[in-house]
Structure formats: structure tokens, C-alpha cells
Image (cartoon, grey):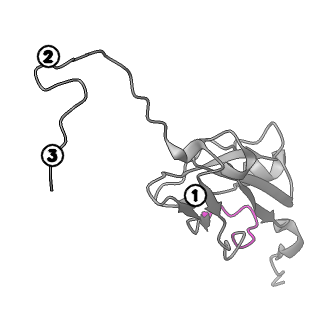
Amino acid sequence: MMSKDSIYGNENDLLRASGSFDVLFTSPCGDPSKTTITPTSQNPASPATDDFSETDMVFTYVPYTVVPAFCPLTVSCTSFDNPVDSDQSCDESFAGNVIKHSFSTTDYTMTGPGNYKMVVTVSSGGSDASLNPTFDVVHTLTDPCLTAVVTSATNTE
């Protein structure tokens, strides 16, 4: 193959240029067009019922799937619909994908029996709703007085 000489000649000086520029790489984890979070079934969706026994009501989060897989997911309690006077709140974190609440007789006098919903958000960091799906965990508290047993002393006269 024959080499072709430049039309500008071979004796010209090389032209060189230099400069600087910034390259900005953005994480795809906050972009709903690049990231997908797929919910998994939370089984059971709620802990067992309790009668203010101070026993931990344990909920174990089943991790959601995120694509791309390197996007970290943050799991947090975003609301807990309980009366203001109760000491139960969303202050707890999911340590090891587990969250625990316990309810005492003090909670009974302040809140009473019923269903109390905790809203949990799973987030990849973006503001789009598809990157912040939620699910509910319902704590069912029963009235311990309904199953109370009253015993009386027997008279031995």
C-alpha cells in the first residue's frame, strides 16, 4: 500500500493545543430513567398482635431489589400513626433489617387498643416517587382487660 503525502506537506510544524475541562459523573441511583426499585413481599406484613405485654413486636424487612445493584437503598420509618402522648415513634432504625417496638401498660393508658400503622420508605436517594416506594407495617394491640381473670379468696369458715 502506498502512503499518501499530506496536501500540507511533510515539513510543517505540528499544531498542539491544551486546555482544561471538568467532567461531572452523576450517580444513576437518583435518576428514575436509570434506576428501578422492585418491591418484595413483606411476609408477614405485620408483627403478631400484642396486649401491651412489653414483649418486642418484631418486624423483619425483606430487602427490595434495585437495578443497578450498586445503588444503596435506605430503609426508614417515615411515620407512625400513634397518639401524641405515646412514647412510640419512628426514632428506631432498621438494624440488620429488623425493627422492634414494645408496648407497655403505660402505652395502654395513653393510646388504648387498636391498629397502629408505621409507614416505611425504601429509597435510592432520588426525589421521584418511583425511587421512594413505601409499605405499611400495622401493629395490632388488643385490650388486656378483655381476657383478665379475677380470682377471689375463698372463705374457709
The residue closer to the viewer here, 69 or 94, is 69
Residue to which mark 1 is pinned: 99
- Per the rendered image, the range of residues in magenta is 47-57
Q: Residue furthest bottom?
A: 156
- Amino acid on which the number 2 mark rests in the picture: Asp
Q: Is residue 53 magenta?
A: yes
Which percent across, then down, holds residue 64? 59, 64
- Amino acid on which the number 3 mark rests in the picture: Ser
What kind of element bears circle 2? loop
- Mark closest to the chain's N terminus, 3 or 2: 3
Instruction: Report crowding for label 3: few under 14, some 14 to 19, many 20 or more residues within 10 A (C-alpha).
Output: few
Q: Give the spatial CA distance, label 3 vs label 1.
A: 74 Å
Instruction: Report crowding for label 1: few under 14, some 14 to 19, many 20 or more residues within 10 A (C-alpha).
Output: some
Residue to which mark 2 is pinned: 13
- Mark closest to the chain's N terminus, 3 or 1: 3
Q: Residue at x 17, y 25 (%)?
A: 9
Q: Residue at x 81, y 56 (%)?
A: 116
The quadrant in which residue 101 appears is bottom right
Q: Residue at x 84, y 75 (%)?
A: 147
Residue to which mark 3 is pinned: 3
Q: Magenta stretch: dominant SS?
A: loop
